[in-house]
């Protein structure tokens, strides 16, 4: 066991451990350790010294630094838990007892698993898996997610976090197969073949917090709904959720209130209230809340909405801490391209005069259908007030805001609703904070309040569909190259499905919607990592075809897994009448091969456990932990520094060497974004929800080029686009953005 203070032997042991199997000569690495350092300080000092040697030519120093950090974690855990540090991991059952007694772990782990079962699982924990972490990955996991006591002392170690998550998610499975399912989950997590969403990673097995990532609320046009919504959003933000909010039903500035004309202040003041909520109700004390507000492109307040995040103008009309998204029908993009006119309306006035809500329709077919017919009716009505503007002027304001703030996000509402697998049961108005979730929405309606027989005040509501995002992601760079997708996706879908039943959410509507659709969002990260390992250039038809083939395979396995779960546990309640039920989902996608037709028959016969299945989230943090590239994005640079409070952590693209460098060299601000759109269109065909898809552009990009990117994204069937990430730096080799 290492002593509290350093000795030459203990330092030699640290260095030997770090250099093992990494082809780095420890004898040539002369580092003088101050005598007064403890083992923890020595390990930290050595890690920083190791990172100083790291560059594109020497990426393995990240693993040297990681092993110093590991040794420090082992030593701290051993001291805090009272076991021999030479063993690395202590008694797992004792850990569960300690942290349960301390109020950190939920008592359910000890209540639902016997000591014999826990000891059996402890024997399957493999410390060698810790050696796969990069320094940045381990640093992030250790500082944000491992369970500590209330004084932030180290108790839980990385492999114990994976095992606790596995146990927590499988706690209610049939006991005859439960241990096998726990071990399958541990296999998937410990090999870094997949990651769970950040809230699941942080909170599974613990007493506080919830497991879902994002939520989407729909605000009705009433004072009651606006303030109820604000309260609900505050509760979700407190528990660590990101929130998307559809504001399109709220009346515009100058609209009437109770017949008095010109009284409404419009949506901006209510968004400013949400901005204050985001700042004041932070996420578990770690960061301010994250809220994205969406508005329709035809709403009369759209111009002031698009100015919300600008740095100039009247600050009373700004909301700098929320994110914005625009809901766009096909017709608007057609008018932009044709340089035609666009009309803005007040949704309250439309309801009052026309007898329908324009936002409740969409174009079922491209070119002619319900929404544009209703829009044309509104344009032709002499009873409606309206504002005519050139469509291109609105688009210019969108792009100006995007280059200054990164937002608004783009939500192509017609395409989203045409592809909605549950369009029999509702409509999708907007997306979530990260633009990958598209599920049915509706506002919660306040009905009445009264006193009961005990004199208590009772409020009665008709609950709406309040969307919940339950996420996890495949690590493409490992899972595809090691050919484990079939085994992986089967356990991954089960893990996600179990989140729905185990999770405790702070709002009743979210619980009800979660059970109604049992929606999950199986996603991916490590796309650029995978291309590098397969030596496929980003800007190539080969990459587009590979995306098409790979995501079709992922879709097939995900649908098959949900179907099999349905046969075992039953379908989601809203299955009847869905595109899954009728088989239209497979017809719409053009899945005509015998294999797909057989799966279609099985789904129609056995049902689906989950109404929504796939969504590709940004997952940058969990990708860092897994040592891969974020989402479907290109790497920022092949070598860069991740900023932390006390120092910069040097980071290279994963598995960077002379074989992969040429693929990584074409990094985010260099690759032709038109190829990125083509890739994303290929994968979007197979994703039933959406994808967090960023544009990477210089801030000097010509407006016509950025406009062409948006038009291409819309024409090729993308449902959403996320940030326009622009840089003020000169972009090397950016030929495409000049064309």
Image (tube, rainbow, N blue to C red):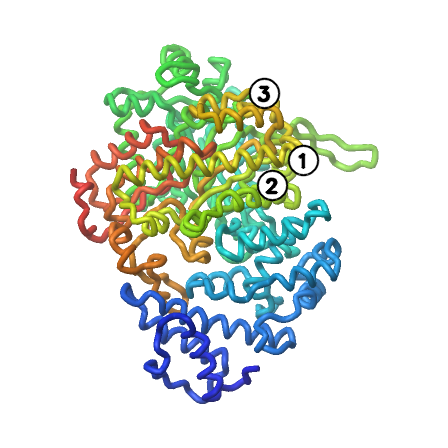
- Residue 636 lies, in percent from the top left, at 31, 53
- Residue 404 lies, in percent from the top left, at 29, 44
The residue that disc 3 covers is 577
- Place residue 580 in its image quadrant: top right
The residue that disc 2 covers is 497
Q: Looking at the image, is mark 3 or mark 2 earlier in the sequence?
A: 2
Dividing the image into 4 quarters, which one contains the N terminus? bottom right
Q: Is residue 100 left or right of residue 279?
A: right
Q: Observer-nearest residue: 732 or 56?
A: 56
- Residue 308 lies, in percent from the top left, at 37, 40
Q: Observer-nearest residue: 252 or 290?
A: 290
The residue that disc 1 covers is 569
Q: CA distance from mark 3 to mark 1?
A: 19 Å
Can you see residue 304?
no
Q: Are marks 2 and 1 in contact (CB under 8 Å)?
A: yes
Q: Secondary structure at mark 1?
A: helix
As drawn, 137 above or below 410: below
Q: Secondary structure at mark 2?
A: helix
- Place residue 549 in its image quadrant: top left
Q: Are marks 3 and 1 in contact (CB under 8 Å)?
A: no
Q: CA distance from mark 2 to mark 1?
A: 11 Å
Q: Are marks 3 and 2 in contact (CB under 8 Å)?
A: no
Q: Residues within 10 Å of mark 2 (few under 14, many from 20)?
A: many
Dividing the image into 4 quarters, which one contains the C terminus? top left
Give the foreground label among 3 and 1: 1
Q: Looking at the image, is mark 3 or mark 1 earlier in the sequence?
A: 1
Q: Residues within 10 Å of mark 3 (few under 14, many from 20)?
A: some
Q: Secondary structure at mark 3?
A: loop
- Residue 616 lies, in percent from the top left, at 44, 41
Q: Looking at the image, is mark 2 or mark 1 earlier in the sequence?
A: 2
Q: CA distance from mark 3 to mark 2?
A: 21 Å
Can you see residue 344?
yes
């Amino acid at each position: 066991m290492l002593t509290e203070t350093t000795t030459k032997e203990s330092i030699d042991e640290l260095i030997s451990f770090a250099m093992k199997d990494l082809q780095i000569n420890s004898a040539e690495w002369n580092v003088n350790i101050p005598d007064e350092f403890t083992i923890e300080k020595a390990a930290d000092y050595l890690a920083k010294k190791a990172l100083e040697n790291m560059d594109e030519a020497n990426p393995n120093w990240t693993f040297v630094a990681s092993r110093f950090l590991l040794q420090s974690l082992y030593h701290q855990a051993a001291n805090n838990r009272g076991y021999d540090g030479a063993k690395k991991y202590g008694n797992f059952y004792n850990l569960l007892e300690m942290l349960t007694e301390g109020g950190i772990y939920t008592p359910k782990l000890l209540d639902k698993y016997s000591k014999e079962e826990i000891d059996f699982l402890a024997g399957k924990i493999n410390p060698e898996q810790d050696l796969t972490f990069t320094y940045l990955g381990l640093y992030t996991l250790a500082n944000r997610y491992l369970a500590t006591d209330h004084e932030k002392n180290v108790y839980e170690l990385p492999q114990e976090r994976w095992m606790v998550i596995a146990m927590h998610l499988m706690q209610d499975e049939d006991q005859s197969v439960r241990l096998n399912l726990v071990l399958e989950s541990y296999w998937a997590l410990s090999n870094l073949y997949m990651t769970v969403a950040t809230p699941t990673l942080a909170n599974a097995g613990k007493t506080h917090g919830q497991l879902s990532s994002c939520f989407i609320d729909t605000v009705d046009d009433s004072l009651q709904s606006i303030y109820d919504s604000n309260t609900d959003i505050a509760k979700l933000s407190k528990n660590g959720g990101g929130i998307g909010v559809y504001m399109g039903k709220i009346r515009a500035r100058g609209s009437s209130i109770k017949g008095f004309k010109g009284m409404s202040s419009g949506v901006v003041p209510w968004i400013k209230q949400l901005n204050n909520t985001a700042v004041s109700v932070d996420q578990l004390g770690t960061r301010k809340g994250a809220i994205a507000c969406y508005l329709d492109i035809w709403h009369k307040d759209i111009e002031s909405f698009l100015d919300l995040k600008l740095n100039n103008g009247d600050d009373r009309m700004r909301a700098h801490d929320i994110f914005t998204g625009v809901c766009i029908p096909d017709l608007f993009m057609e008018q932009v391209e044709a340089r035609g006119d666009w009309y803005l309306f007040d949704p309250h006035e439309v309801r009052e005069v026309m007898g329908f809500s324009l936002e409740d329709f969409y174009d079922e077919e491209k070119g002619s259908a319900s929404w544009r017919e209703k829009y044309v009716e509104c344009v032709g009505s002499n009873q409606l007030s309206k504002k005519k503007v050139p469509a291109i002027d609105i688009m210019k304001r969108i792009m100006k805001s995007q280059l200054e703030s990164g937002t608004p996000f783009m939500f192509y509402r017609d395409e989203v609703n045409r592809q909605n697998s549950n369009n029999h049961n509702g409509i999708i108005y907007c997306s979530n904070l990260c633009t990958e979730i598209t599920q049915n929405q509706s506002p919660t309606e306040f009905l009445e309040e009264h006193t009961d027989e005990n004199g208590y005040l009772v409020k009665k509501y008709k609950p709406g569909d309040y969307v919940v995002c339950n996420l996890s992601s495949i690590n493409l760079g490992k899972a595809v190259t090691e050919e484990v997708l079939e085994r992986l996706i089967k356990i991954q879908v089960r893990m996600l499905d179990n989140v729905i039943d185990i999770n405790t959410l702070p709002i009743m509507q979210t619980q009800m919607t979660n059970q109604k659709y049992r929606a999950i969002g199986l996603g991916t990260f490590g796309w650029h990592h995978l291309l590098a390992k397969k030596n496929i250039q980003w800007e190539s038809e080969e990459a587009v075809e590979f995306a098409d083939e790979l995501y079709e395979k992922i879709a097939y396995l995900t649908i098959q897994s949900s179907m099999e779960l349905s046969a075992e546990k039953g379908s989601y309640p809203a299955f009847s009448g869905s595109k899954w039920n009728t088989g239209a989902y497979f017809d719409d996608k053009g899945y005509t091969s015998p294999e797909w037709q057989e799966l279609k028959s099985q789904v129609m016969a056995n049902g689906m456990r989950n109404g929504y299945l796939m969504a590709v989230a940004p997952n940058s943090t969990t990708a860092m932990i897994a040592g891969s590239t974020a989402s479907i994005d290109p790497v920022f640079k092949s070598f860069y520094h991740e900023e932390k409070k006390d120092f910069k952590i040097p980071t290279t693209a994963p598995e960077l060497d002379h074989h992969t460098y040429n693929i990584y060299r074409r990094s985010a601000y260099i690759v032709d974004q038109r190829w990125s759109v083509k890739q994303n269109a290929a994968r979007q065909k197979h994703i039933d929800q959406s994808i967090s898809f960023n544009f990477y552009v210089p801030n000097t990009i010509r407006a016509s080029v950025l406009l062409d990117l948006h038009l291409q994204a819309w024409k090729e069937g993308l449902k959403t686009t996320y940030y326009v990430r622009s840089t003020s730096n000169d972009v090397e080799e950016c030929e495409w953005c000049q064309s």
